[in-house]
Image (cartoon, rainbow, N blue to C red):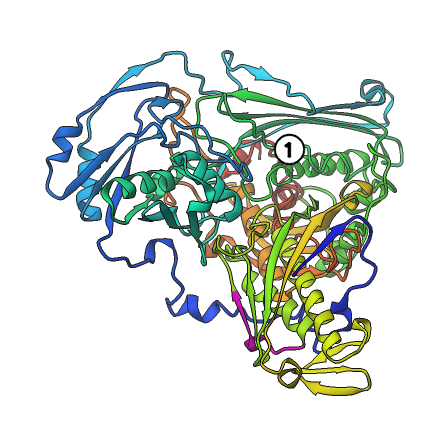
Amino acid sequence: MTRTFTMDAPAEECVLDKAGDRLTGAPLDRPDGPLKVSGRATYAHEWQMPNKAFGVLVRATISKGAVKSLNEDEVKALPDVLGVYADERFLRNPAQGMANEAPVQNAQEIAYFGQPIALVVAESFEAARHAAQSLVVEYSIDDDGVFDPEGVNAPHEEPDGQQFHQGDLERAMKNAAFTVDSVYRTPGHNSAAMEPHCSIASWDGDKLTLRGSYQMLKFNRNELADALGVGAENVRILSPFIGGGFGSKLGIAPEAVAAAIAAKDLERPVSVTMTRQQVFDMVMRRSESRQRVRLAADSEGKLIGLGHEALVSNLPDEAFLEPVLQATHFVYGGENRSLGLKAARVNRTCAGSVRAPGEAIGMQALENAMDELAHTAGIDPVELRLRNIPERDPEKDRPFSSRRFAEALQEGAKRFGWEKRNPTPRAMRDGEWMIGMGMAGAARVNMLMESKARVILNADATAVIETDMTDIGTGTYAILTQIAADMLGLAPEKIECRLGDTDFPPASGSGGSFGASSAGSSVYVACQELREKLAQLINCDASELKLEKGNATGGGKTQNLRDILSDETLSALGHIKPGETSDDVRQATYGAYFAEVAVSAVTGETRVRRMLGAFGAGRILNEKTATSQCYGGMIWGIGMALTEELVFDLRDGRIVNRDLAEYHLPVNLDVPQIDVMLLPEKDQWASPIHSKGIGELGLCGAAAAVTNAIYNASGVRVRDYPATLDKVLAEL
């Protein structure tokens, strides 16, 4: 039986609050952890299949044009080569998240350097790689490529629905006691997931099974089916374990379609794994940005005007644009507002969602500007933000749902020791090192997505969860197990969680920080139905039923679940749907970051000495995994502040630093002691389990806390990210 719950009104009561053991929220170890550390968790590349062939993708070495010819016959004649494929169905671009249809195909038309154009398949990976390197491509070259988003030949668009104007910002800027008008630049970023893309395709007649590494299977199946021209019912995707995604695996990517086409032709399984360099070239990048932020404040530091204009880029035929202004619309007040997003159409690798799309870089610039305003006005940066938290949504005049922004600022400051900060730049010194403290606010929109899960209660009082939900390292196996354990009164070890299979009910997928709340709510709803069935079996009202330690109490007596079930298996399908609460209130998660840095007066080098984040994200479903998510976000923020940037050759648009040797992620020595505070919160408007997303919140503005601390330490205001030592040293 299907039980559907639509969020049309706040969910005032939650059964989880009445659970006996209260496992939900506890720092439960991941049930998949032992499998991963022992090497028994099977990732996409590790599936062992008889008669498997190996494919290697070939990339374009021009930036714009078309493939004229390939020396296919010569390559096919090489030892162990099985085929050379350049099918018109090949993907030119990866699919955007939730596209639900094929992305741009016909890879013979070239739009960017490094684009996939062909696949070579052989008996071994080594033979396939050699053959791919031997493929000679003749091109017709177009000389009108656009490679610089800010170049004179770059076409700029102002998309409908991306411009917002309220009041008179220009007048506010003229009449303000204090103003800021600054331009910030952020570079492109790569998701750099630990596991590169891999797909293994195998056919059984007209039935395709793809073992891959993907985040949103119900969409990925439709995207793959549409690209191949087959029915979605004939496609099965298996992704039980995913070695990180961060947005790069939201949509189907070139290797999946190529593997499926070759496997069909060869009538044997074909595995295609991207190299790290290919991932950088062929999979989503975060767009670079140019952001102008204008702030107008009265004599008390209260905002009377706010302007935020951003330029981002993407390929000419891509609808996705980095939603830079997403949080600016609501996080601070100011009655006079002007927000606008422009798009530059360039011949660069496709831009798409990278962890916390929008807020990751939008809050970065906004929080830098707020720090500049605080310094100009002589107001403590924490106090300035507290004064500018709006009572209602400043643009749509609707209430906020639960919001712990003020508490994050205040409690975070207290725990960090913010009162010890000297507000005067360059006032604190430790030998050659200048010491400073900085902070920034955090905000991320909250979303609930349609999701389904089946929960089966077996006669032996064990349970099984089935959903095509994925675990990209975020703890889905643990969280869904905890919810079911509390709802059914079972120990976690009595529950088996089965994920990552499109034969299971379609879930929200992992992305946008909505996965745990959405998939978790579907499990919760399914368990509600099971509780009602159990209540009927023991003749009591479901509201009176108490399930604990494998026993059910109701109707004045306690019985063992095994006795109640009496060889019967119960099953329920939970279906959660977003509803009117998505529009009735402004839903978001909030936080605050605090950082202490040391800047060398000799070299300009910056070292982060300690960092704290305080976050409010609704009910925390697992304290350990939530804390880990915040650790990861803040570490990424350190990278964005100091080291990470995609470097493009402006002559042809190619990515110069396509590996982890030259794309500089933070390593152990770059990361200090990090402290995370998870503030108690329940949001009845967000989901029936009162939770909100946290996976991306820890990144939204984190970089700004570091660069604001650099200013406090050295007096150097870096507005062109990352804050590398040469930029700092030049201003010392």
| 325 is higher (above) or lower (below) than 513 | above
> How far across and down, in percent of the image, does residue 295 sit?
77, 29
Instruction: Report the side of 355 relative to 414 (left or right).
Output: left
Task: Name the residue nearer the viewer: 3 or 202.
Answer: 3
Could you tell me how many numbered marks the image carries? 1
Task: Name the residue nearer the viewer: 702 or 725.
Answer: 702
Examine the rendering and report whether any part of residue 601 can be seen.
no
Q: Which residues are magenta?
A: 489-497
| 437 is higher (above) or lower (below) than 110 | below
Instruction: Write down the quadrant of residue 460 in the picture.
Output: bottom right
Residue at 38% x, 37% y: name it.
254
Residue to which mark 1 is pinned: 324
Instruction: Write down the quadrant of residue 520 in the picture.
Output: bottom right
Assign the N terminus to one quadrant of the image. Answer: bottom right
Task: Name the residue nearer the viewer: 277 or 215.
Answer: 215
> How far across and down, in percent of the image, does residue 531 sit?
71, 71
Assign the C terminus to one quadrant of the image. Answer: top right
> How far across and down, in percent of the image, does residue 220 sit?
48, 43
